[in-house]
Amino acid sequence: MLLWRWASRRYLLPCPTWLARFLENPVVKGMGTQSVLDRLDLRPGMNVLDVGCGPGRLAIPIAARVGPTGQVVALDVQAEMLRRAQARAQAAGLENIRFVHAGAGQGKVERGVFDRALLVTVLGEIPDRRAALQEIFDALKPGGVLSVTEVIPDPHYESQNTVRRLAATVGFTEQSCSGNWLAYTMNLVKPER
Ligand SMILES: C[S@@+](CC[C@H](N)C(=O)[O-])C[C@H]1O[C@@H](n2cnc3c(N)ncnc32)[C@H](O)[C@@H]1O
């Protein structure tokens, strides 16, 4: 597992697209999705950035919650993941999702416009995690919240202390941490000033 973690960062190997089927499985899709959504405190009209959206497990229900006056930007480094998410958005009749094909931290995200951002089982796959967190920090409005979820079966699992340390280096302050070390969601705020 450690070798896979090292190799995936060293050689930029994100979660393989054949695993998208696993994430789309109704049982897996349901696992933790509701609690991640509830911990985001979403409201109609919000702008949400889903970094490493995969096949859209969260981007789709978020787009439904923020409604037509809100928007989701779903970013992923793999075109195949975005294609799957796009197909699901189309099937659900959702027109408020914009798909961005880019790596996190590569400067493809608008600054200062998002109310919420998510990194759900993604952070450990990102080669330059500090650049990614800096980009998300800059993309949020003051008072905006980044929600980081990690689950232990994921080979790229990042501990609460690692997330805390990395987040603090770019200026986030911790708002809450729910769950336990096996599966947790940490909400981090961009201070108002
Ligand atoms: C384990 S999947 C999680 C997908 C989704 N967040 C979920 O919870 O269902 C990790 C996703 O992060 C994406 N990813 C990996 N490295 C990335 C990077 N550097 N920038 C953007 N996305 C990345 C992968 O392509 C994959 O879709």
Image (cartoon, helix red, strand yellow):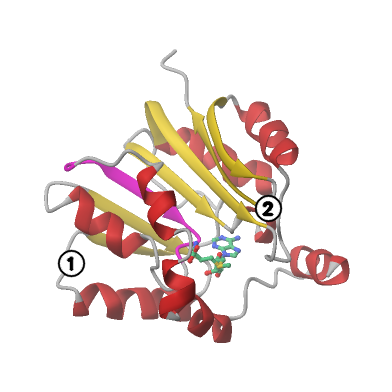
Q: Amino acid at mark 2?
A: Leu
At 45% from the left edge and 63% from the top edge, which residue is drawn? Answer: 53
x, y (%) of residue 163?
A: 67, 40
x, y (%) of residue 12?
A: 70, 68
91 up-or-down from 138: above or below:
below
x, y (%) of residue 184?
A: 59, 46
Q: Which mark is residue 182?
A: 2
- Element under disc 1: loop
106 up-or-down from 42: above or below:
below
Q: Residue 137 or 41: which is nearer the viewer?
A: 41
Q: Is 112 situated left or right of 3 in this image?
A: left
Residue furthest to the top in view is 193
At 29% from the left edge and 60% from the top edge, which residue is drawn? Answer: 61
At 72% from the left edge and 32% from the top edge, which residue is drawn? Answer: 165
Residue bounds of the magenta highlight: 44-53
> Which residue is under mark 1?
94
x, y (%) of residue 68?
A: 12, 53
Q: Amino acid at mark 1?
A: Leu
